[in-house]
Image (cartoon, rainbow, N blue to C red):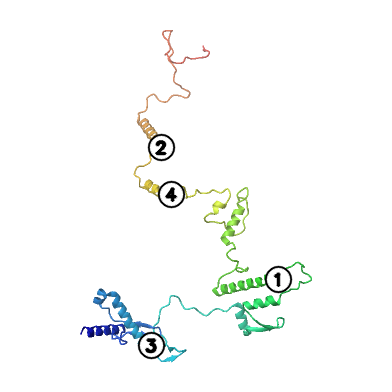
Amino acid sequence: MDVVKAVLEKHQKELDKYKPITVEKHLECRIDVGSLLITDPNDFDDRQLANNKEEYLAALTRENTQLLVNAIWELPTERVDESIVAKLPEPTTVLPRLRKPPGPRPLTKWEKFAKEKGITKKKKDKKTYDDVLDKWVPTYGFKRAEAEKDKDWVLEVPENADPNTDMFQKKMDLRNEKVAKNEIQRMRNIVRAKKIDMPRSGYLGPEAASSNQLLTAVTVAKSSTASVGKFQSKLPKEKEARGLGVKELIPGGKRKASHITAQPEREANLDLIKSVLSKKPKIDVDKAISLQKQDERIEREAEGANRPAKKGGKKGKGSRKAVGKKPKGHQGQRAPGKKGQTGRKRR
């Protein structure tokens, strides 16, 4: 009995590996075979989702995939290169786009001219017969260049040219010029399609200076005179260069102190916060003394204005305070410490 039971268990395990192709759902799933999309409106089983999440989601995914595969096998099939292929119908689900669909490619300058004149493009043959080499050579491609080297192994120097001229290098330069011209034309077609303004000189490349750089160069050149550009005339509607680093380039101009110091940024920020949050104000001793003197002077002036006026009226012009009282009849001396009258005495 144990042997039979073991055999049955083994057979059951083998059957469990192969899941059935029939799937039962409470609600029918919406299948879009054209987009290979299936939507399951059934709710999750909360108990199985909490107990064994990974196995439950894997089994649910297998069932939905099985339904999609069953719908694909219901489509008409055909055999292509020993493979069975099913032709998908048009998709029914409208998927949102991040950006709008691209429009038709704009015509280039030559394509527009050819369309107006009715010029049709003729298909070139892949190979043409060369009478000089006496063989078929490719019309384009890397082997075409090798054929040109075999054909032009010697070049004639014109009579009006320098006999020491390298004609091979001159031919290579002409070819490079054609390549550069085609590249410029290609960039112009792109700019024309995007409706962007471009200078007549064409695409100058990243090494060309921008308008701001040219304006900065003009400003620095005008400021390089002895008067620092004070007496330089300006063109109509001319602007001065502004921005970071422009004043540092002007000679003799006032430069601001750099905010970059040897002190680390963290220490500088801490010092700034301490100075703002510190409750102890800085005391200026000289200013405090001058304010105290000013208050005392104002008080003295206010006291003098409140005193009563003296009797006797005003003195005449030229009156002055007597230096000392003159003694009478040689009965005394002048007040000590007072300076006596000097000079000749009038009688």
Choose between 248 and 162: the one closer to the eye.
162
> With 52 as the anchor, is 216 left or right in this view?
right
Coordinates of residue 255 in the picture (x, y in percent): 53, 49
Residue 19 horizontal/vertical position (percent): 31, 84
Q: Nearer the viewer, residue 199 or 300?
A: 199
- Mark 3 residue type: Ile
Q: Name the mark nearer the viewer: 3 or 4.
A: 3
**Which corner quadrant holds the N terminus?**
bottom left
Q: Work out whether residue 238 can be spotted.
A: no
Q: Residue 265 in the image: state x and y as whole percent.
A: 43, 50
Residue labelled with disc 1:
168
Q: Residue at x 72, y 70 (%)?
A: 167
Foreground disc of the pair 1, 2? 1
Q: How far separated are the C-alphas under marks 3 and 4?
A: 69 Å
Please tell me how crowded label 4 is: few (under 14), some (14-19), or many (20+) other residues with Cα within 10 Å. Answer: few
Query: Rounded to the nearest whole Å, what is the CA distance between mark 1 and mark 3?
Result: 64 Å
Question: In front here: 50 or 293?
Answer: 50
Q: Specify whether 164 is left or right of 33.
A: right
The kind of secondary structure element at disc 2 is helix
Q: Position of residue 227 (x, y in %)?
A: 61, 48
* 1 or 3: tag closer to the N-terminus: 3
Q: Of discs 1 and 3, which sits in the foreground?
A: 1
The answer to whether the residue labelled 2 contacts the one labelled 3, judged by CB atoms less than 8 Å apart, is no
**Nearest-to-viewer mark from 4 and 1:** 1
Q: Which mark is residue 72?
A: 3
Under mark 1, the amino acid is: Phe
Q: Residue furthest left?
A: 1
